[in-house]
Image (spheres, helix red, strand yellow):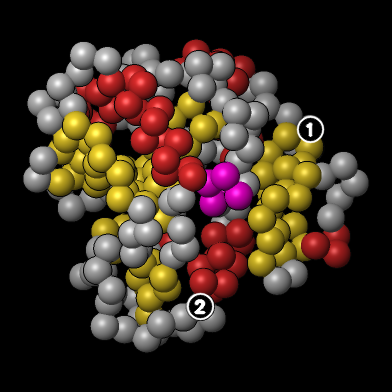
Amino acid sequence: MTDASFFIPLKNRALIRVEGKDAHDFLQNLITNDMDNLQAGRILYACLLSPQGKFLFDFFVHHTDGGFALDCEGGERAEELDKRFSMYRLRADVQITMEDNVPVYAVFGDDNIGAPDPRHSEMGNRSFTKPDLPECPFEEWDRRRIMLEIPDGSRDLLVNKSTMDEAHMDMLNAISYDKGCYIGQELTARMHYRGLGKKHLKMIKLKELPDKAELRSTCGEIGLALVRSEG
């Protein structure tokens, strides 16, 4: 691992654009985080849940001239998110478009490029512009986020099964407990305030994988696994 400035191309990213007069309120009523906390030049991390409070999608929300752009998983995952938003659109004055195979870069050591990854200060900045810096392989980014116990979307969170509590998503700045209602809010808040979660994603060494642990993403000799919490 180097301490110099460098960038890492991220894999399989897409953009969902939500634009129009009602774009802010449309997202505010759906996602886990508070759209009012999105500041100029910053990024908001959030999820879309099922009505039962289970994980469906995660994404990074950016301001645009016409509304908002959501940096999300690409391919079929982006198509599914696009369809889900379109289903919820109803009479809202919003336009929803999708762009797949969007270049996204993680930038380390240069705070003048992109905006800080809102999940953790050690995850660098995220940028849509390719930096004029040395390039490092994706495995460097993957190892870093596994060491920090940060899930990578549906690689680590099971669609329609995982809860926000499993990955301590509130500690990754994905959840607002003050904004009011959103889809899946009731279960998410109840698990948080009552401490109902019994299993959580933890970084493990593959050779020390605990019995009955559910292994998710891996990089080299380490990975994230869902394990029963002690106590």
Quarter of the image for the N terminus: give it: bottom right
Q: Residues within 10 Å of mark 1 (few under 14, many from 20)?
A: few
* Whether residue 142 is situated above or below residue 231 in the rendered picture: below
- Residue at 63 percent across and 32 percent down: it is 162
> Does 184 sit left or right of 226 as displayed?
left
- Residue at 51 percent across and 72 percent down: it is 138
Which three-letter amino acid code belongs to the residue tagged 2?
A: Pro
Q: Residues within 10 Å of mark 2 (few under 14, many from 20)?
A: few
Q: Magenta stretch: give its range.
A: 151-155
Percent coordinates x, y for residue 134 in the rendering? 37, 86
* Whether residue 90 is situated above or below residue 157 in the rendered picture: above
In this figure, which residue is indicated by the disc labeled 2?
A: 137
In this figure, which residue is indicated by the disc labeled 1?
A: 231
> Does 26 sit left or right of 221 as displayed?
left
Closer-to-camera residue (49/82): 82
* Quarter assignment of residue 127: bottom left
| Alpha carbon separation for disc pair 2 and 1 | 38 Å
Percent coordinates x, y for residue 55 in the rendering? 54, 31
